[in-house]
Every structure is written in C-alpha cells, then in structure tokens.
Amino acid sequence: MNIHAVNISKRFGAFHALRDVSLEVKEGELVALLGPSGSGKTTLLRVIAGLEQPDSGTILLNGEDATAHSAAKRRMGFVFQHYALFRHMNVSGNVAFGLQVQPKATRLSRGEIKDRVAELLKLVQLESLANRYPTQLSGGQRQRVALARALAVQPTVLLLDEPFGALDAKVRKNLRRWLRKLHDEIHVTSLLVTHDQEEALEVADRVAIMNQGQFEQVGKPEEVYDHPATPFVFDFLGNVNLFHGRVEAGKASLGPLEWAASENTEQWTGPAVGYVRPHDLEITRDKSGNGPAIEAKVMQISAAGPRAVVELKRTDTGELIEAEITKARYQELGLTVGEVVFVKPLAMKLFAGTPAAEGTTFDI
Amino acid sequence: MRVAISVPAQTPATRAKIANGGLLRVLLIGAAFLYLAFFLLLPLAVVFAQAFAKGAQAYFSAISDQETLSAVKLTFIAAGIAVPLNLLFGLASAWCITKFNFRGKNVLITLIDLPLAVSPVVSGLIFVLVFGLHGWFGKWLDAHNIQIIFAVPGIVLATAFVTVPFIARELIPFMQSQGTEEEEAAAVLGAGGWQIFFRVTLPNIKWSLLYGVILATSRAVGEFGAVSVVSGHIRGETTTLPLHAEILYNEYNFVAAFTAASLLTLLAVITLIVKKFVEWKTEHRNESAVLPEQA
C-alpha cells in the first residue's frame, strides 16, 4: 500500500508535535523515521495508524482519504515499543487475536486460524514457545511475538515504533538484520521509528530525519549520510568536528584553514561553520607539504578496535577535536599522548551562520 | 483502598539482634496479642457466647424467627441491587477515567470519593430531604403513590450511595498502572470497542474487580448509619440485619440480638476468607509478572 501523509499538524496542549509535515511511502518500501526523542516521529506513526487524530492534514492510503477511518478499519500492522502483548494470553493466543476478532463473515475457521498461527510462529522462529505467556519470554522473543501478531492479519502496511529500543545491542543487531530479510521476503510497506541512526541507515530504503516536528531531510541512507542537507542532520548522523570562520568571495577561512565554498559562492558572505567527520581528518607530523593545517596536542588515544580514535586539543583555541584514523596509519605515526601534531580535513561541509547551541538547527 | 503491609527481609544479623533482646520480644509480641484478644477476639467470642447463652435451640429458633428472616432477606436485596449497580458504575467510571482524557475528570474522581468523606447519617438525611414527604420530590411521589423513604427503595438507594467508591477506587489505580497500550494493540488488530473490553480489558482487571466487589458487598451488608435514617424501623419490613440486631438489643432480647449479630459476623468471616483468597490470587499473578527474564 502507498501511504501519503499530507500537511499533518498535531499539538498536545502547548507542545507542537508535528508542524505541517508531508511524507510519502511507496508500495513495498521500508522507510525509517529518525530523530531525537520529542521530534514527533512516534506521533506521525500513530497518526498514520489511526491511533491519533491530526489537528489538520490528510492521510491518503493508495490515494484514498483515510483520515477519518478508525485504527481497526485501516488494518495496519503496528508493533509497539514496549510490545503491548496481551499479558493474559499465551503466545498463540496473542498471534491469533487479530484473526479471532474479525467479523464472522470474513473470519477464518478455527482450524485455519490454528494453521496460520503455526505458520507465523515458524516465520518468527518461536514454534517451541507457543504456550508460554509474555512474562516468560525474553525481550527479543516478545518483540518477535509482537511482529507475528501484527503480521497475522496480513496487513498491507507494517508500522514499527522503536521496535528494538528496549533490547541489548547484540539482540538488536540480529533482529534488525532479520527484519530486513523478512521485509525482502514479504515486501510489506513498512515505516520504522527509531532514534538510532545506525539502525536507520542499515535497515531502511529511505531515511526521514525529523527534528522539532519537521523533516530535516528525506533520502537514501548514503545520500543523507554523505550529503546532509542541514547541520542538524550532519550532527545527528554521527560524530562531528566544528570549525568556525567566515566565508568571503567563495572562500572560507576557518582559523588557519582555507576551504573553497562550493555552494552559492557569489551571494554568500558571512560567518560559517565547517563540519568534518572524525574519519575525514588527517593527522600529520610536519606542517610543511600540503597546505595549511591546525596545530593540536594529542590528549587521549583509544586504539581498541579496528580504528584508532584520537582526541586532540587545538593549540590556538583550545577546542577539542576528534579524529579517527586507521590502525595502520596510527602505528605508522606512533602517536603518543602529549605530543603536538597537525590536523587537516580531507572533506568538509560548510554551513552558514554560527551554531547557537548543540543539537539545534539554524537556517542556511 | 488496599493496604499492603510488607515485611522487609531479615538478614541473619538483624534476626540475631532481635532474638538477643528476648524479653523485649516476648513483651512486644505479648502486647500485640493481648491487644488483639481484647479488642477483636473477645467481642467475637461474646457475640457467639451471648447468641448461644440459652442453648442451640434458642439460637436456631431466633434465626428462624420471621422478622430475622425478613431482615436477612432485605439485607441481601439491598446488597444484591447496590453492588451490581456499583459494579457497572465502577467499571464505567474507571474505564473512562483511565483510558480517556476529558474535561471534568478530576471532578468525577473527587465525587466518587464523596460517600467516604460524608458521614453515613448525613447521606441518609440527604435522601430524606430529597425523597421524604416534606422533601423536594415528596409531593410528586406522594401524588403518584410511590414511597421511597421508610421503604425498601430508600434502603437500596442509601446502600448504593455509601458503596459507590469501593469498586471504582479499587480499579482506577490498577487500570492506570496498566496503561492503554494493550487496548491500542487490540484496536489496531481490528477489534471493536466491546471486543476490546471483554477480551483485553476485563481479563486483565478481573481480580481487582472481584476485590472491589468483596469490599463493596461487606460494606453494603454491614451499613448502619445511612440505612437507619431512611429505614423507619418498621419491623419485618424495613429492617436490615444490623438494624434488626439493634432493635432487638434495645428490647433486651439479647439472645435474638446476638443471633442476628452472629449472622453478620459469619458473613464478615466468609468475606475475609474470600478476600484473602483473591489477594493471594492477585499476588500470585504479580509474582509471575516479574519472573526473571530468560534470554
């Protein structure tokens, strides 16, 4: 099913949860709604499911206005953050519920329901736990029961609200791979809410990044990661180093650094901030050679894992810089804490203005 | 409504410390038992001793007395109407208070508590003022030959009034703690309002509901103040068991008075046993809810 949310606004008292947002999810697509808590992503999901009425705006399902339809009528699969399993029913009972409450005319027979439940439990690999109660299951098992329950009614849309939020890192990783595989098998249009950028980038066909009730950017994972449209997106999708300076006549001067401002160069004059990912920073011993660099003192090195993360302090401004280099480069340099080195960005994204505070957006 | 008394787990060290103060321990436990014996067991024993003072035959003839039987009947009629009424009201109010947001919610919660705050005698007087011969509707009721005060309907009304809070107050905190996620899940899965109520909400609250019913029933059976005001004390017609016991006592008919009292006491004991069972059942369920997670 094709979902089209058009100009949705929703307030809770004084809190503006959604400000005139629009989003289209195409048939068979898996889209992730990504954002910090309070950004409105869960509200949008609940509006689409029919659990919340928007103050204004329309929900089109396959082009048809479904804004006034009840949650029951929309027939979407919804997986809740805290599973919301029926605690007085066992696993089979939970999965069968959606089939049992159908009107008599369309309801399957007892035998058919039983077969369907068995089939679904096999799909989520829980056949052996059919008679357990929710309290007797682990978090990951509960989540899979919730998924099977949602899939039982053969929904045309699957909505997942932080489905892996309450699970530990390892289970999370396994489950999201499994979810992606499942999606590739059954091709149900899916919308996933998450605050974990790694999860969104790994699982989704497209990622919609939300902040303060609005979309910052919607695009393919590599698109939003490599070409963030706003400073917020840049900041939210990974660690970042900021270099403050000015842009004039197509050239940015950020302390000792010089950088060509490629976008809107003619009109653009004023304060600017360069955003650099830790892995886009190069550490060298000598200043001479390829252009100006920033002098910094090595404060801390953590070399566990495949890459070495080096924390440095600028000698001119005292600001901290985080650089991530390969293990090989790290060994080649033989860095020690306390020594002074030179840092140079290999790639940078320039945004105009001065950031007011961390995590807030500002206009370009 | 429910008071949970939890005894903190004793470490061997604290237990040893308590055990060392042997005399103090004996004194404290002894005092507690003496207190209980004096204020609970002794009156209970007196009730039965007085009831059987003139032998079992006098006791059973007092029970089979026409007026006693009709008092028992009236007591059950009043409770039998008041409790189901409050069951419906308690369920409905708890459902809308905990699952929806609306204006005046806090007013409703406060009103539910009103019968607990007002003296039962005052509640009885209110009914007399409203439905009595000189009350607001008195003339109209009299003209249509409907008698509420000094008749069975008044007793039922008074009983229903004083038992309003019990079921609702038991359900509201419990349903609040459960949230609305399961209901939402059911709605998304295609269940209608009644299906959600009977298949999801009701099974989750059944033990709390039963507990509230027990509390309301014991209060309905034992209510004296409000019922006394509206009853008119017409023997064999408008006397419930507590009223009947008082009338007999005032007539120095001690055996019969204590026989009626013993019936009330028996009802209380049965209620306590059922209550204990329900408590055990709810606790048992809560225990299973916090089973350690198996990975």
Image (cartoon, helix red, strand yellow):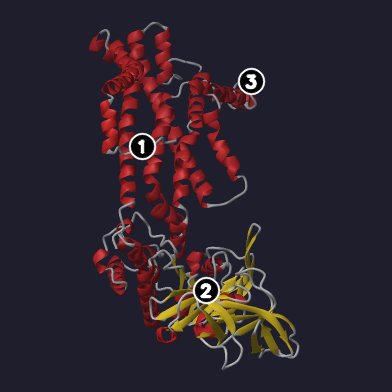
Residue visible at 58% across and 22% down in the picture: B125
Q: Quadrant of the C terminus of chain A?
A: bottom right
Q: Secondary structure at mark 1?
A: loop
Residues marked 2 and 1, same chain: no
- Return the residue nearer the eye: A292 or B135: A292
The residue that label 1 is drawn on is B6
Question: Which of the labelled discs sits on residue B134, or is there none?
Answer: 3
Q: Answer yes or no: do the residues labelled 1 and 3 have beta carbons within 8 Å? A: no
Residues marked 3 and 2, same chain: no
Quarter occupied by residue A345: bottom right
Between marks 3 and 2 in the image, the one whose residue lies nearer the viewer = 2
Q: CA distance from mark 2 to mark 1?
A: 45 Å
Left or right: where does residue A298 sit relative to residue B5?
Answer: right
Q: Answer yes or no: do the residues labelled 3 and 2 have beta carbons within 8 Å? A: no
Q: Chain of mark 1?
A: B
Q: Secondary structure at mark 2?
A: strand
